[in-house]
Amino acid sequence: MSKYEVDVLKDLKDSKKRVMTNVVEQIAQREVKKKYLRWQYSLLTVILTVCIGLFIYTQFNEERPLSASDVKILDEKTIEMFLGMANQEFMNETFQTLLEMDAFYAYALDKGIVFNEDTIVEQDNRTQDIYNLIKNDPEKIEEFTKSNITLDEFFEEFLEPNTIKMIAQSELMKIYYKKYEDAFPLHAYLAVKNESMQYFLAKYGEEIKHLEEKYQLSAKTSYTSNQLKTGYIAAIEGDRFLVDPANNGRISNEENNEKPLHGMWFPIHDVIDKVNVGDYVHVKYSLTSTEGADTAANLLELEIIE
């Protein structure tokens, strides 16, 4: 387990509020500024986001494959329940999160991911934590009452059956971390999410289009308040590259190993054949995440400046 995974698990134990904040900040499905998420924004969005962001790292003993009969994919009853409880401002965000959960599950199913009963119990415990957090807040209980459903009914009918989707996401993350054990959580999440959604859109494109038209929502993530950075690529390591505005473009990876690196790290997957150490680049990004002394960011566009 990498040091980043340990940090995530420690956060889960230390503070549920901190978990919510960290996950919402790092999840790249939407534009979120670094601040504490207020519950009144969208109860259902918070529930879904926290569920997706919970990483489970367990050792497997008796394993069994994921089964297509365990849960439904693109279930309209589930979608309508969540959309019906979401604030108008976050309808599209909630819709995209539901699609994302299904994408993780469908992609893990396609890859033959396996899990055991201990893993399910572990995730159920996480779900119970969310349940306990909500049931002690009268204002949140009132939101369920307005939707003509009790908290118990909601968890039994809609959240617990989707536990396997959370497990699927966690297992995909584990595969990524095996390949890039020092990956930043934001970059790992982005890579797994993008790969899963590409598969999902290709396989369920017509069904998703139907849902977009029916609910007048979009499955495509849009980013606002995009930011720009110009600098030299100072290093390429594993699944990322570093853009340093102060670098003169002549520092090699070997030299960087002997001195602290400064700048912003971006995922390299989409541009791996285009960039080299020393390139002068112009990058556009939106989300950022602080990982110790490093800063990670998503990558929206990259231009190599001659």
Image (cartoon, grey):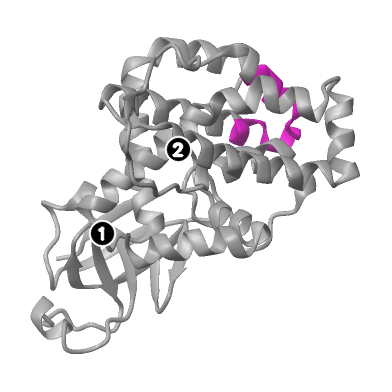
| Principal secondary structure, stretch drawn in magenta | helix
Name the disc covering residue 181, or none.
Answer: 1
What's the amino acid at mark 2?
Asp
Q: List x then y, in percent, for residue 177.
A: 28, 52
- Mark 1 is on which residue type? Glu
Q: Residues within 10 Å of mark 1 (few under 14, many from 20)?
A: some
Instruction: Give the side of residue 87 with respect to residue 278, left or right.
Output: right
Residue at the extreme front: 61
Q: Is residue 54 magenta?
A: no
Against 279, residue 226 (above or below) is above
Which residue position is annotated with label 2?
118
Q: Which residue occupies 34% across, 32% down?
A: 196
Asked which secondary structure carries label 2, the reply is helix
Q: Is residue 90 above or below residue 203?
A: below
Q: Closest to the observer: 126 or 176?
A: 126
Q: Which residues are magenta?
A: 79-94
Q: Is residue 298 visible?
A: no
